Amino acid sequence: MFGGPALRCLKRLAVCAAIAGVLAAWQAAHWAGWWQAVRVTGDSMAPRLPGEHYAATCTDCGLELRCGIEHLPADRQLVCGNCGSAANPVSGEPIRGGQAVWIDRSLAARQPGRWDLVALAAPGDPQRLEVKRVVGLPGEAIEIRAGDLRVNGRPARKSLEQFQELAIQVHDDRCRPATAGLPPRWSAANAGTGWETAPGGYQFRPAASQVGTGRSPGALTGRRSIINVSGTTAGASPEHWVWLQYRHWPGMAAAFPPRRRTDETQIVDHYPYNQALTRSPLHPVTDLQLRLNVRTAGTGQLALRFQTASGTHEARWAPRRRSAELWRDGLLLRSAPVRVDHVRRSVPVEFTVWDHQAALRIAGQTVLWHMVEPDSEPKALETISAQASSPSGDPISGIQIGVTGPMAVQLDSLIILRDIFYLHPDGSGRPWPAAGSIQLPPDHYLLLGDNVPLSRDSRHWPSPAVHRKSLVGKVWHK
């Protein structure tokens, strides 16, 4: 029945199946040897890679909270880093396991790049693995100055994706506290200027004098806006900006000196994950990102502004003219066309100032990027820390959103993130090393943890430089 061509075909299929089985078995053994699944146990890489921790949901704003088991407040109540509510018990809550990660043990993984996560044999305890982040590469001179990492005397610059990996959220407007009577986090700089709170966000309605029809537009809808953009008045001058401003709350359990829940403060290097850790002083962070969804109708401009000790950074977007600009301290740095379809829809916008660079993203496209040349000497940290308020009356946080011209605006999903702020091994903002830099020999790396106040890393080890042979592999996570 089976013979000739049919028999030969069956034999070939059998050989192919045998080869496929051998390859599958080899691949399984290959992956089993090169990939290792583990769970993080310590807190040195939190909040990105938390170890064992407690979790709760803020009873006031609904934000998900986490706290390392070693830094749980004595009353077992977590303070929300977003709204400052202190009524978030974890009594009866189970301890959550640490983050699951994969270690890639291949040879290629033992030659990591800057900002990569790596596993290594712990100094002094080779049987224990640690996870750290690569910040210094062979042959480089590394130093920490005013919270920044410097390589060969220049700022170490992250990409926007790398910034997202290390950034820490400090405000989420999607989670608004339900408690009545609290002051607003976002409010108009001057009452009656057109900015108002809306469900899930904020909206700006230009005055009737700014609209050619003499009618003030209603809320934006899916239909065509009623704004007539045929003409403007002096009130719609490009110099006449109307501002919505953000006020930051402490949001910490162990503040020193003690602060009230709604006391306005600067954005500092606080880690809500380290609930019971008391640190003083905390350090203002000026590398920030503002994310939001924007919907517009009209011919005006929208501005996103950071006013900090490092200067005033501003991104301007004119949706109808399809153009955008970056400004610093009143000077135009760069402009570019914006090829984004924003008509009748909300678009995500991100403005980021980090590592001596600024970028504007609209609908996922980086429409503007500019590198700012740093001062030859970093500004003294004491000078930055001393600026506790704005002499102009602007909010201490320095974060504002402005509109000029006859344009209706709707905003929602406002989120603020801060960059990582590196410290001296003693937890202060002093330079490390005190003089000069750490010169890395060939095949050696410098490794730091993301949870800067808690991490034991190259800043503390007897030898800051880690040889490539001590690296087990790269670490990957979801």
Image (spheres, rainbow, N blue to C red):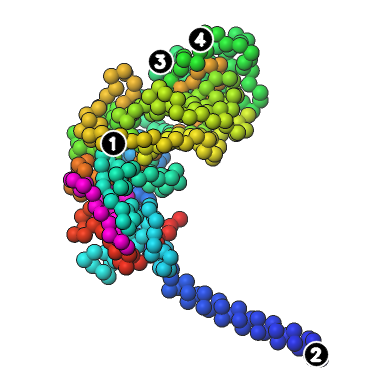
Tell me the mark number nearer the camera, choosing from 1 and 3: 1
Callout 1: helix, strand or loop? loop
> Helix or strand or loop: what does disc 4 sit on?
helix
Q: How far apart, in angstroms, are the residues tagged by discs 2 and 1?
A: 83 Å
**277 left or right, relative to 45:** left
Q: Where in the figure is residue 418, as x and y percent of width and height?
A: 36, 39
Which residue position is annotated with label 2? 4
Please report contact status of discs 1 and 4: CB closer than 8 Å, yes or no: no
Judged left or right of residue 154, residue 234 is right
- Asked if 261 appears above or below 469 in the picture, the reply is above
Q: Is residue 452 magenta?
A: yes
Task: Give the amino acid type for the residue marked by disc 3 in the picture.
Answer: Asn
Are dots 3 and 2 in contact, CB under 8 Å? no
Which residue has dot 1 on it?
Answer: 376
Marked residue nearer the N-terminal end (3 or 2): 2
Image point (43%, 70%), residue name: 34
Task: Residue at 31% x, 18% y: name it.
Answer: 392
On the image, the x and y values in percent for residue 401 come to 44, 25
CA separation in Å, label 1 and label 3: 39 Å
- Tell me the residue that label 3 is attached to: 190
Local secondary structure at mark 3: loop
List x then y, in percent, for residue 245: 40, 24
Of mark 1 and mark 4, the one earlier in the sequence is 4
Q: Quadrant of the C terminus?
A: bottom left
Q: Earlier in the sequence, mark 4 or mark 3?
A: 3
> Is 234 placed above or below 443 here?
above
**236 in the magenta segment:** no
Which residue occupies 66% across, 25% down? 223
Which mark, by number, is residue 235? 4
- Label 4 to label 3: alpha-carbon separation: 15 Å
